[in-house]
Image: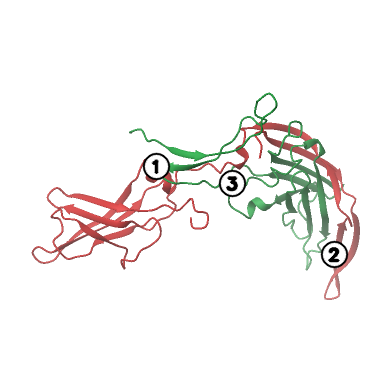
Chain colours: A green, B red
Amino acid sequence: MNRLPFTAVGNNSVALKSDGHATTSPLLIKGSLLSPVTITPIYAWGPTGHDKTGCAAAPKASWTLSAPFYTNQTGDGISAIASQDFNVLLINTATGYEASCMSGAGFGDGLTPTPATGPLNLVCAGSEFQSFGGGRYSITTAASFDPATFRFTVNQTWYCDDVNPANP
Amino acid sequence: MSARSVQITASASESLPLTCTRVSVETDGTFAGIKTSCINSGDVTLPAQLLSQDALVPYSIEDPIPGPDGCTLSSIFRPQWTFSAFEVDSSGSNASSVSFNIILRTGSPGFQFPISVSQDTTAPAGDGSWHACVIGAGGDTGPPLWPTACSFKYQATTQELTLRADWSCSELDPDHP
């Protein structure tokens, strides 16, 4: 194939330290393509809170559980079906990311809800399911709730590229 | 956004301070089980235990989702139309009409209806002369992948079909992909 030349243009600013070195390295310069076609790219907005100040200060991160709610309905085998259910709104304080966590419909055989014993696995969903264009990285959450002990367990992965507090 | 991009994974596990109430459930006055409801009146805060903190490629958090070439890149590097349903209809001694279907080939074609192309006159086809394209069943302009400024010629002796067309790609326009 013949060589295809590309032409683009972009600019950015960077502060210098007293020794003349840039305060940020590497430096990103976003470009607009001029040829062979004219394109000004639109960037993905990325996972929630990635550029929120304090995001990367991970040791101070915590979750706020808002309105945890567990219900258990015993069955009688006739008109009442056994079931159990757990809901909570999970908020990541480092990013502000909110996920709604809920158990599946814990219906059993009518007399016993599922699972009969042990923790309920929760499905947690946030804004990544509502909008298109978030980008290649998504916040992922795994959580469970044990009705016997009320123990709530959560494991979450998020992303940060706010200013490094150690080197602003 | 800064050059330092990280992926953070953390966890927490604690028993929640829930308060439970139990009520009997009745159906038509008959006892039908017990419903237990457990809540906490306020919010619960769980400190995060850091499991891992991995560096990512600088500035990569706002990268788009990788995918196959769409309309724009396919048109720059490998513009192709797929032809189908080619027909030469003859009526009478010389008059004949050429028609065919085309689909623009891209890395992510999705589902496209074949675009029908026919000639706008009943002049003899197949003699190698250029004809303006009549696009679609009714000749209406359609979605962005439909060709504009389109013309074709067909040489019956060599069975060679030539298509000249302009088209546009708008998949980079988030409002009108």
Nearer mark to the viewer, of 1 and 2: 1
- 3 vs 1, front mark: 1
Q: CA distance from mark 3 to mark 1?
A: 23 Å
Mark 1 and mark 2 on one chain: no
Query: Mark 1: which amino acid?
Result: Pro
Could you say whether the residue bearing mark 1 is in a helix, strand or loop?
loop
Quadrant of res B149: bottom left
Q: Chain of mark 2?
A: B
- A150 and B119: which one is in front? B119
User: Which residue is disc 2 drawn over?
Assistant: B33
User: Is the residue under label 2 in contact with that under label 1 (CB below 8 Å)?
Assistant: no
Q: Are marks 3 and 2 on the same chain?
A: no
Residue that badge 3 annotates: A44
Residue B94 lies, in percent from the top left, at: 9, 62
Q: Residue at x 86, y 60 (%)?
A: B37
Residue type (three-letter) at the residue carrying disc 3: Ala
Is label 3 in a helix, a strand or a loop? loop
Front residue of B166/A62: it is: B166
Distance Cα–Cα, label 1 vs label 2: 72 Å
State the residue position of label 1. A36
Could you tell me which secondary element the residue under label 2 belongs to? strand
